[in-house]
Image: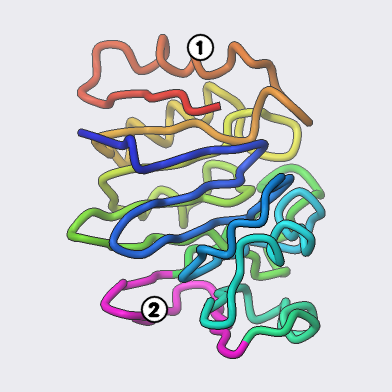
Amino acid sequence: MNVDNITVNTQSSIKLSLSKTIYFDPFKIDSDMHDADIIFVTHDHYDHYDTDSIKKVKNENTIIVAPRSMEADVKKIAFKDYVLLNPNEETNIDNINIKAVRAYNIDKPFHPKENDWLGYVVNVDNISYYVAGDTDNTEEALSVTCDVALIPIGGRFTMDVLEAATLAKSINPKVVIPTHYGSIVGNINDGKELRNNLNGTNIEVIEKL
């Protein structure tokens, strides 16, 4: 499956260059791009909600999608249109179906379940992409169906490699792209370790970091 139209920058800063240009958690963006049709934010930690980077990719028509718990933050940035979602809510923007998936830690304090922070499943051009946000291998994550899964593997704040491999085997996407490793947390070789753990499956692991 061709995923050349997906870029992963530092951490979980993801860009989908499709019929629409879609960003997830833009972070440490160097250049003024102003090309975003939609920006998704998963939660308000600094490496996911970077207002300087958001301003570099947004334009006057950009729509931002964020957890409803971040309404006050979103209103501080001058967006003409924004969409706030709770876990399990679905919506449609320009023929892109969006489902919000609760993202949280099971046995760590960093991302409490009650914060209602999110990952997203977006269906664009008949391909579904799951951007998990900062999460463990949760019941909600295990319920996802997708073609491409972008999941954190760095451990400490999220799943580690073994937990991510277990999730991938359970939801069985065509492609897994690991995120959230090699900079703030995790080792740059974690992507290769994930691939080794998924050898023998029909899941292709593609490293973008």
Along the line of sight, the residue nearer the viewer: 10 or 175: 10
- Left-right relation of 47 to 39: right
Residue occupying image coordinates x 38% and y 52%: 17
Residue 139 placed where, x, y %?
A: 47, 53
- Left-right relation of 201 to 167: left
Residue 151 placed where, x, y %?
A: 50, 39
- Left-right relation of 151 to 198: right
State the CA–CA distance, disc 1 to disc 2: 34 Å
Query: Mark 1 falls on what kind of element?
Result: helix
Residue 183 placed where, x, y %?
A: 74, 27
Name the outermost residue toward the front.
32
Badge 1 or badge 2: first in the primary sequence: 2
Residue 99 quadrant: bottom left
Name the kind of residue labelled 1 in the image.
Answer: Glu
- Residue linked to disc 1: 193
Residue segment shown in magenta: 80-99
Residue 41 placed where, x, y %?
A: 62, 64
For the stretch drawn in magenta, what is the main secondary structure?
strand
Which quadrant holds the N terminus?
top left
Is residue 87 shown in magenta?
Answer: yes
Which quadrant holds the C terminus?
top right
Residue occupying image coordinates x 28% and y 55%: 128
- Residue linked to disc 2: 90
Along the line of sight, the residue nearer the viewer: 173 or 48: 48
The disc at residue 166 is none
Residue occupying image coordinates x 33% and y 30%: 169
Classify 10 Å Cα crowding around label 1: few (below 14), some (14-19), many (20 and above).
some
State yes or no: discs 1 and 2 in contact (Cβ < 8 Å).
no
Q: From this view, report whether residue 189 is shown above or below residue 139.
A: above
Name the kind of residue labelled 2 in the image.
Answer: Glu
